[in-house]
């Protein structure tokens, strides 16, 4: 079996999710940095891996995968991570919780989107922070309300890490980065504290995997 390789960027939320899952599965991997700030994602080499020009790309089991949610599903089903309940109703509700972050909130706060917005606003001072706050804060408020439908014991949907936890923690990193306050959201704060004590999450944190400059 070939070496597992993750093409990622240390601050990428989608890459952060996959790092957590790889750690949970106990899969050793080699990280190859694709510097989004320098535009490496648009290089011919990377576009050959992913025509969308996004990270992460995961080489594993002699196959290559893109899109973090698809990668998480593959790792869940092949490594039995238990990221989602098996009962159809509970599974759909847990997926909706995770997708509230990964599908609705994250895309509009992605780096390439913010660059376009800043360019349209002629890089007006503070536009990036204003844009991020406009979406992250309401998105987290909605997530907090959705959490009320589940029992945090102590994680989003129970006592073991699930898909929602994997999607939430990178978004909280972004919230902190852009100065978005969520200190009044107790359910989210409780989940954040619980995840911080799980090695798979802590070892995937951007500050831990950040390449040496």
Image (cartoon, rainbow, N blue to C red):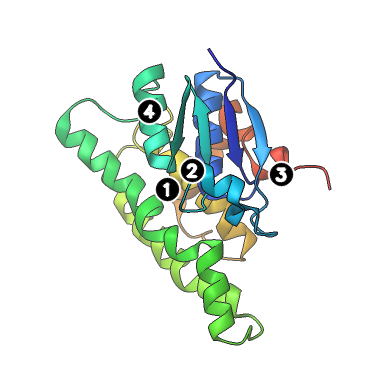
Q: CA distance from mark 2 to mark 4?
A: 28 Å
Q: Which residue is mark 4?
A: 74
Which residue occupies 45% across, 51% down? Answer: 186
User: Given this view, does label 4 or label 1 mark the residue nearer the observer?
Assistant: 4
Q: Which residue is mark 2?
A: 190
Q: Position of residue 102 (x, y in %)?
A: 40, 51
User: Given this view, does label 3 or label 4 mark the residue nearer the observer?
Assistant: 4
Q: Position of residue 82 (x, y in %)?
A: 35, 23
User: Given this view, does label 2 or label 4 mark the residue nearer the observer?
Assistant: 4
Can see residue 24? yes
Can see residue 55? no
Secondary structure under badge 2? helix
Q: Which mark is residue 207?
A: 3
Quadrant hosting residue 150:
top left
**Pointers 2 and 3 in contact (C-beta within 8 Å):** no
- Number of other residues with Cα within 10 Å of mark 3, as a class: few under 14, some 14 to 19, many 20 or more: few
| Residue, far right | 213
Quadrant hosting residue 180:
bottom right
Task: Classify residue 169 as left or right of residue 85.
Answer: right
Q: Earlier in the sequence, mark 3 or mark 4?
A: 4
Secondary structure under badge 3? helix
- Number of other residues with Cα within 10 Å of mark 1, as a class: few under 14, some 14 to 19, many 20 or more: some
User: Given this view, does label 3 or label 1 mark the residue nearer the observer?
Assistant: 3
**Pointers 2 and 1 in contact (C-beta within 8 Å):** yes
Secondary structure under badge 4? helix
User: Given this view, does label 2 or label 3 mark the residue nearer the observer?
Assistant: 3
Secondary structure under badge 1? helix
Q: Which mark is residue 187?
A: 1
Relative depth, front residue between 44 and 99? 44
Q: Earlier in the sequence, mark 2 or mark 4?
A: 4
């Amino acid at each position: 079996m070939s070496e597992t390789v993750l093409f990622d960027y240390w601050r990428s939320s989608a890459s952060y999710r996959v790092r957590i899952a790889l750690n949970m599965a106990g899969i050793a991997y080699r990280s190859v940095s694709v510097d989004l700030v320098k535009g490496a994602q648009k290089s011919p080499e990377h576009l050959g891996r992913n025509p969308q020009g996004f990270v992460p790309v995961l080489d594993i089991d002699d196959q290559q995968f893109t899109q973090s949610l698809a990668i998480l599903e593959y790792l869940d089903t092949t490594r039995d991570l238990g990221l989602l309940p098996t009962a159809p109703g509970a599974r759909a509700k847990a997926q909706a919780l995770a997708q509230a972050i990964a599908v609705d909130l994250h895309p509009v706060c992605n780096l390439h989107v913010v660059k376009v917005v800043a360019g349209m606003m002629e890089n007006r001072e503070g536009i990036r922070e204003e844009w991020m706050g406009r979406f992250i804060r309401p998105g987290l408020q909605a997530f907090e309300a959705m959490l009320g439908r589940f029992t945090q014991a102590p994680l989003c949907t129970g006592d073991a890490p699930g898909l929602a936890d994997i999607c939430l923690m990178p978004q909280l990193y972004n919230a902190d980065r852009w100065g978005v306050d969520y200190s009044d959201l107790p359910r989210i704060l409780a989940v954040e504290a619980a995840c911080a004590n799980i090695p798979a999450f802590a070892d995937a944190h951007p500050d831990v995997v950040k390449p040496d400059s």
